[in-house]
Every structure is written in structure tokens, then in C-alpha cells.
Image (cartoon, helix red, strand yellow):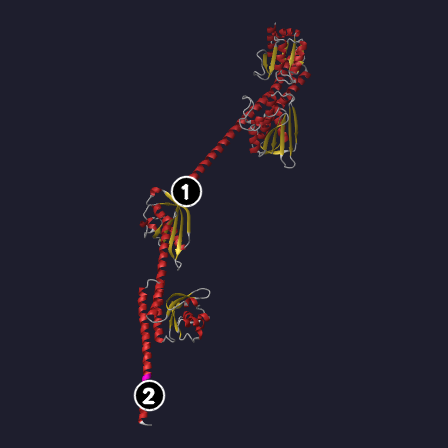
């Protein structure tokens, strides 16, 4: 080997070295230029971040910067959708797109359409690179459309919040393997900036929305406190006023501002405090209707009445934090109620008075009827006694007369004496019969109906005989009745007296009185009917015969009490019924006991 | 009870009387008293009977009760006065009221005092003669 050859070899080697050096330098320069571009893009992205006023502008401007400043062919931002296909929807783009985004389908689920850079970046939250679109097997779904538009490599940078990816910034380069580590880091920094910006916008929006909501809620609360009809008071746990409704302030005749911060029970000391402390200790809901309250600052209002509700509101540690105090002024209702009750009490008193008056009136009428009955008795006694007295008188005078005419002997005297004694006995019996009407106790006893009716009839019998009235009696002798025998006798006598009077008034010849009594087998009731043939009641008075002071007799004879008292005795005292009805030629009184 | 009466009573023997009374005992008793004194005594137990007897016998005196069945004393008196409006009539009644007395007649209230009755009879004789 000669020197020349050696030199040549050396030169060749050096040349080769230089060439390698140049290639290396060129590569470094290219990388440097790329990095510079990327750095420039990052800087501008920062400017965009500060200048953008909304999310869409931020996205669009960022894409523009990526393409214009960093020299990429296309940049777009897609957000992961929560739809059925979990698609990624483009939100903004810049650069040479030519319908690319519309022509492709990208998802973020783990399927062929989701295993490209975008889907993978969203799923994993890490930057994902496709070094060569023409050869990368994962890029199959989009290869044709991408190649057609000159995309050779691409990177997808996740957009994250709280470590969760919700979208991706996608960048396409015209040469393969365009994204080395440095550039990827820079681009990642850029996408972080973008994420930060997006998140800031969203947080800001959220805050605006929350503020708006709070404002609205506060407004609604204001409306409630302003317009509620019931009074609403919010107290803290120590019963200091936090808030009161307009109605409450109005009811207390104060300004709302006078309450806030002050203690309820210092302003209005009352026994309610003890109950409120109880509510606080027991943490229960307190409810009262028509609770009386006197305003200490307005004693002239008198006692007011309130429907109250005191609700303790607990915090998360189950301690009382607030009290919600609701009140409704029911003073007027209470006063109306009191007035109504007073009115009712007055009415009741008047009713009682009237009842008492009626009772006394009844008592008086009863007394009157007793007097009338006694008068009737006297009348009947007088009638019954006159003829026997007259006979006795004549017989006494006859003894003297017979002596004068020499007719008097032992036999004559004996007959006279016997006859006189018979008459005297009759007088005596009459007294016995009449006694039942004015003597005897007023107690209720069991008495025999037949005996009682006979005795009452005997009082009238003399009259009926003298008028040739037929008296037909058919009374079951076994019937006994519980009651006051005096009163019952008076009823029978009243009815018989009415018959006597009607016979007299209408000059009834062949008068017939039928007295029938029996026990009804199906009801067990005792029925007593007294029927006459005196012509009956006039149609226009049948409804009134039992009314007090109603009479058809002339004033000297009738008081209009007989049937009324009979009704009182039978219906009130003996719990029976008495009715009057006309028969063909007379009237029938029917008593059921 | 003076002798004067007994003497005067003898004038009644020439006279007749109608006594109308529904009470049997009374009628029998007073009837006995009248029969001892009057020449003729007619007894009737109601107004209808009394009027019939009056029509037939025209007695000098009529003594009558008022309350009687069939025909009462008032109706009978009216019938008698229709026949002879000067007929002396004595009413014996238990009731001292307008219904049972008559201003036209002499009214005696029961119980009957026979002396009073006799006085009434003499009084009527005086008016008649």
C-alpha cells in the first residue's frame, strides 16, 4: 500500500466523516428548527389563552396557531361524546382539511375506530403518535382519506380535567415521524395549556351559573318572605332573628330591620320561651292552635291569638342550627268564635228559660185543670146529693106528717128509717167514690183499670141515668196499669164530662157511651176507647182539640184544658198516646198505654 | 106547725094537683104528703106524661121538677101555659138558676120544705081565686 493510496483512503474516510457530520448537523438543525417552531407555537398559544374570551375561540385560535406557527398541515379539537357509539365530535379545526373530518368516523371505545391516536389518547389520557400513516396497522380505518390529503404522521394530545380525558387536540404533519420526544413534550405542554384554558372557561361558566342560581334562589326567598300570608320567622339556635317576613313585621307594627340580630324573647318575653326551650332540648316540632299572646309593647291590643309552628332545623351533627317559626294571626276568628259561643250560650239560656217558662205554664195549666176537675166534682157531688138529700128531707118531714095523720106505727117507722139509712149510705158511697179524685198519693202505683174506670163512671152515673144514657162497659178485669191513679181517673172523668156536655148541648136523646178496654195481643199494649154518639167533632177543629185553652163550650163551662191535660197525663206522665177520631155518629177517644 | 094550717088544709080536699118528678123515691114521698091533703093527686115521671095528664084532668095545681128525661119541666110548663096561661105552677128544682126557674112560676129549691110548699100552694090559691 503506498502513501497515495493511504492518503486517498484517509481522505475518503475524512470525507465520509464530514458527510456524516453534515448529515448529523442537518438533522440537528432540522430538529432545532422544528423545536423552535413548536416553542413559538407554545408561546403564541399562551397569548391566545389570555386573549380568548370563550371556549370556542380558544379552540379555534389554538388550532390556527398550531398550523400557522408550528407549520403542521391540520389541527383539530374533538370532544368525547357520551352517545351510544361513544363518538368523538370535532369542535374546532384549522389547516388543510378538505372534508376529512366529515368523511371519517372516530370513536373513543376500544374498537377498530377507537384504536387510532385520538381514541387511544382519550382512553389512556396520554399523547399518542402515529409515526407513519401509510404503514401503521392501527390507522387502517382512516388511511385512505388521510393519505389522500397528504397526512403522513399524526399526534393526538389528550385534554384532561381531574386526570380524566374528555377530548383530544389532533395534529397532522406532511412528513412521517414528525414528532420526536422534545416536540411531543412541547406539544403536550401546549395541550395542557389548552386544557387549562378550557377548564378555566368551564369553571367560570359554572360559577356564573351557580351565582345566577343563587341570585334566583335568593330572589325567590325574598318573594316568599315578602308575600307570605302566614308570618315566617327564621331564628338562629339562640332565638335571634335572622329573617322575618313582611307579614310578621306588619303584625308586630315594626320595621323588618328592627328585628334582625335581636333576640326574640328579649323583644317579646313570654311563656312561649319555656316551650321553645323545650322544643330545642327535645328537637321536636311544636304546634299550637289559638295560642293567646299579649304584645308587651302593645297592651292596648288586648289578647291576640295565634296558630303557631316552631320547627327546629338540625345541622349535619344533629344539633339545632335554626328555628323556623311560622305564625298565623287567628285573633279575629277566635273572637268570632267566642262571640258565636256566647251567642249560643245566650240562645241555650233563652231556650232553657222558655222551657222552664213552658214547664211552669204547664204546671199552672195542670193546676187550673185540677181546679176545673174539682169544680166538676163539686158539681157532680151537688147533683148526686140533691135528690137523696131532698128525699131524706121529705121522709123526715113525712114522719111528723104521718104522725099527724095517725099513720105512724112501728112498721111505718121501720120502713122510713130503713129508706133514710139507704139514702144516707148512698151519700156516703158517693163521697168514697169522689175521694179518689182529690185524696190519695200522687205516687205511681199499679192499679186496676176496670175498678178505676167504674169509680170514675160512678161519679157521672147519676147524670147518665137521669138522662137515660146507655152506658156500655166492656173492660178486661185483669188489666192493671202503672201510674198515678188520681191523674188517670181525672182523664176518664174529663172524657166523660165532655160527653155529658155534648149530650146536653146537642140535646142528644138515646145517648150511648161505650167504654171498651183490652190488651192488644201482638203489641202487648193496653187499649182503652170511650165512644159516644154525640155527633162527633166538627171537621175544622179535629186538629186542635188537644190544644191548651181550646174549647167549644161556652165560657161558663169550658176552660179548654181538659183534653190538653189529659194528653199531658197520658203522653208525658204515662208514656202512652191519646187520639181523637170521629165515628159515624159520634166521637171516639183512644188511649194506648 | 100551727093549727091554722090544719084548718086551712081542709080546703085542699076539694082541689086536684099534678106532681111531675122523675125521681121515684121523691115522687112517692111527696105524693104521699099531697094525697093526705088534696082531693085528687096525679103523679107523672116526666114532662110528656105530665102534659098528657094535664090535658085530660086539668088539675088546679101543677108541681113539677125541671130536669127530667123525655120532656123536661120547662117544655111541659110551656105546653101547659099554651093551654091555660093562668095555670098556677110550682117548680121544685135542685138548681137556683135561670135555666131551672121561671119568673112566671113559684120556685122552690130542693130539698123541699113541706111547709114552704104548703105556703106556696096557698099563695097560688090566693092568686087564682
Q: Position of residue A12 (x, y in %)?
A: 33, 88
Magenta segment main secondary structure: helix
* Mark 2 vs 1: CB contact within 8 A: no
Please identify the quarter of the rendering in which residue A346 is found.
top left
Give the SS element for disc 2. Answer: helix
Q: Identify whether A105 is placed above or below A507.
A: below
> Residue reaching furthest right?
A411
The residue that mark 2 highlights is A13
Q: Position of residue A83 (x, y in %)?
A: 45, 64
In this view, the residue in front, A156 or A256, is: A156
Please tell me which of labels 2 and 1 falls first in the chain: 2
> Residue reaching furthest top?
B129
The residue that mark 1 highlights is A333
Q: Could you tell me which quadrant the N terminus of chain A lies in?
A: bottom left
Q: Residues within 10 Å of mark 2 (few under 14, many from 20)?
A: few
Q: Residues within 10 Å of mark 1 (few under 14, many from 20)?
A: few
Q: Identify whether A173 is placed above or below A451.
A: below
Q: Could you tell me which quadrant the C terminus of chain A lies in?
A: top right
Give the SS element for disc 1. Answer: helix
Q: Position of residue B61 (x, y in %)?
A: 63, 9
Q: Position of residue A450 (x, y in %)?
A: 64, 30
Chain to which the residue tagged by mark 2 belongs: A
In this view, the residue in front, A125 or A25, is: A25
Q: Identify whether B58 is placed above or below A279.
A: above
In this view, the residue in front, A300 or A371, is: A300
Residue A422 lies within the magenta run = no
Left or right placement of residue A572 versus residue A309 in this view:
right
In this view, the residue in front, A467 or B111, is: A467
Left or right placement of residue A312 versus residue A571 in this view:
left
Residue A18 lies within the magenta run = yes
Range of magenta residues? A13-19
Amino acid at each position: 500500500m503506498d502513501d497515495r493510496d493511504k492518503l486517498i483512503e484517509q481522505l475518503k474516510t475524512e470525507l465520509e466523516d464530514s458527510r456524516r457530520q453534515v448529515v448529523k448537523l442537518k438533522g440537528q438543525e432540522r430538529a432545532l428548527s422544528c423545536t423552535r417552531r413548536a416553542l413559538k407555537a407554545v408561546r403564541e398559544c399562551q397569548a391566545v389563552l389570555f386573549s380568548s374570551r370563550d371556549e370556542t375561540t380558544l379552540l379555534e385560535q389554538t388550532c390556527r396557531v398550531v398550523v400557522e406557527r408550528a407549520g403542521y398541515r391540520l389541527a383539530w379539537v374533538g370532544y368525547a361524546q357520551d352517545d351510544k357509539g361513544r363518538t368523538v365530535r370535532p369542535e374546532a379545526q384549522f389547516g388543510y382539511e378538505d372534508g376529512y373530518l366529515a368523511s371519517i368516523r372516530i370513536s373513543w371505545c376500544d374498537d377498530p375506530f377507537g384504536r387510532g391516536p385520538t381514541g387511544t389518547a382519550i382512553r389512556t389520557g396520554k399523547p399518542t403518535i402515529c409515526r407513519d400513516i401509510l404503514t401503521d396497522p392501527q390507522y387502517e380505518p382512516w388511511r385512505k382519506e388521510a393519505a389522500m390529503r397528504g397526512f403522513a404522521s399524526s399526534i393526538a394530545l389528550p385534554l384532561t380535567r381531574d386526570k380524566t380525558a374528555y377530548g383530544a387536540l389532533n395534529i397532522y404533519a406532511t412528513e412521517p415521524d414528525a414528532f420526536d420526544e422534545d416536540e411531543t413534550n412541547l406539544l403536550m405542554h401546549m395541550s395542557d395549556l389548552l386544557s387549562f384554558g378550557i377548564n378555566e372557561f368551564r369553571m367560570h361558566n359554572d360559577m356564573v351559573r351557580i351565582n345566577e342560581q343563587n341570585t334566583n334562589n335568593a330572589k325567590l326567598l325574598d318573594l316568599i318572605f315578602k308575600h307570605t300570608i302566614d308570618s315566617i320567622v327564621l331564628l338562629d339556635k339562640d332565638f335571634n332573628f335572622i329573617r322575618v317576613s313582611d307579614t310578621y313585621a306588619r303584625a308586630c307594627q315594626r320595621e323588618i330591620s328592627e328585628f334582625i340580630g335581636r333576640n326574640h324573647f328579649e323583644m317579646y318575653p313570654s311563656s312561649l320561651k319555656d316551650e321553645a326551650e323545650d322544643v330545642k332540648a327535645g328537637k321536636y316540632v311544636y304546634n299550637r292552635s289559638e295560642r293567646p299572646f299579649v304584645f308587651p309593647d302593645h297592651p292596648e291590643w288586648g289578647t291576640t291569638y295565634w296558630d303557631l309552628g316552631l320547627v327546629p332545623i338540625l345541622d349535619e351533627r344533629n344539633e339545632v342550627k335554626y328555628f323556623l317559626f311560622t305564625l298565623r294571626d287567628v285573633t279575629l276568628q277566635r273572637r268570632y268564635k267566642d262571640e258565636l259561643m256566647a251567642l249560643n250560650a245566650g240562645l241555650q239560656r233563652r231556650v232553657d228559660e222558655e222551657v222552664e217558662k213552658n214547664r211552669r205554664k204547664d204546671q199552672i195549666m195542670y193546676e187550673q185543670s185540677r181546679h176545673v176537675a174539682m169544680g166538676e166534682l163539686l158539681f157532680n157531688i151537688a147533683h148526686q146529693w140533691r135528690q137523696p138529700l131532698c128525699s131524706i128531707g121529705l121522709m123526715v118531714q113525712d114522719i111528723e106528717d104521718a104522725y099527724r095523720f095517725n099513720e105512724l106505727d112501728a112498721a111505718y117507722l121501720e120502713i122510713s128509717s130503713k129508706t133514710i139509712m139507704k139514702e144516707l149510705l148512698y151519700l156516703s158511697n158517693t163521697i168514697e167514690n169522689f175521694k179518689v179524685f182529690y185524696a190519695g198519693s200522687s205516687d205511681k202505683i199499679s192499679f186496676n183499670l176496670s175498678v178505676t174506670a167504674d169509680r170514675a163512671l160512678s161519679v157521672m152515673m147519676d147524670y147518665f141515668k137521669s138522662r137515660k144514657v146507655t152506658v156500655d162497659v166492656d173492660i178486661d178485669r185483669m188489666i192493671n196499669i202503672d201510674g198515678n191513679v188520681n191523674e188517670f181517673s181525672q182523664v176518664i172523668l174529663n172524657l166523660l164530662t165532655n160527653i155529658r156536655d155534648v149530650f146536653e148541648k146537642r140535646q142528644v136523646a138515646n145517648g150511648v157511651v161505650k167504654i171498651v178496654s183490652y190488651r192488644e195481643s201482638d203489641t202487648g199494649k193496653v187499649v182503652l176507647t170511650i165512644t159516644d154518639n154525640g155527633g162527633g167533632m166538627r171537621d175544622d177543629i179535629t186538629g186542635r182539640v188537644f190544644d191548651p185553652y181550646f174549647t167549644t163550650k161556652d165560657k161558663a163551662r169550658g176552660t179548654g184544658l181538659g183534653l190538653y191535660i189529659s194528653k199531658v197525663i197520658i203522653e208525658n206522665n204515662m208514656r202512652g198516646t191519646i187520639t181523637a177520631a170521629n165515628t159515624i155518629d159520634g166521637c171516639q177517644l183512644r188511649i194506648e198505654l | 106547725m100551727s093549727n091554722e094550717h090544719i084548718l086551712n088544709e081542709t080546703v085542699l080536699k076539694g082541689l086536684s094537683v099534678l106532681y111531675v118528678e122523675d125521681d121515684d123515691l121523691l115522687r112517692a114521698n111527696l105524693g104521699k104528703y099531697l094525697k093526705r091533703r088534696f082531693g085528687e093527686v096525679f103523679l107523672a115521671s116526666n114532662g110528656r106524661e105530665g102534659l098528657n095528664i094535664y090535658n085530660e084532668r086539668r088539675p088546679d095545681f101543677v108541681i113539677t121538677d125541671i130536669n127530667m128525661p123525655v120532656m123536661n119541666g120547662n117544655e111541659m110548663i110551656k105546653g101547659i101555659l099554651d093551654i091555660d096561661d093562668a095555670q098556677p105552677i110550682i117548680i121544685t128544682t135542685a138548681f137556683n138558676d135561670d135555666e131551672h126557674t121561671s119568673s112566671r112560676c113559684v120556685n122552690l129549691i130542693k130539698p123541699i120544705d113541706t111547709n114552704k110548699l104548703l105556703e106556696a100552694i096557698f099563695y097560688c090559691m090566693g092568686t087564682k081565686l
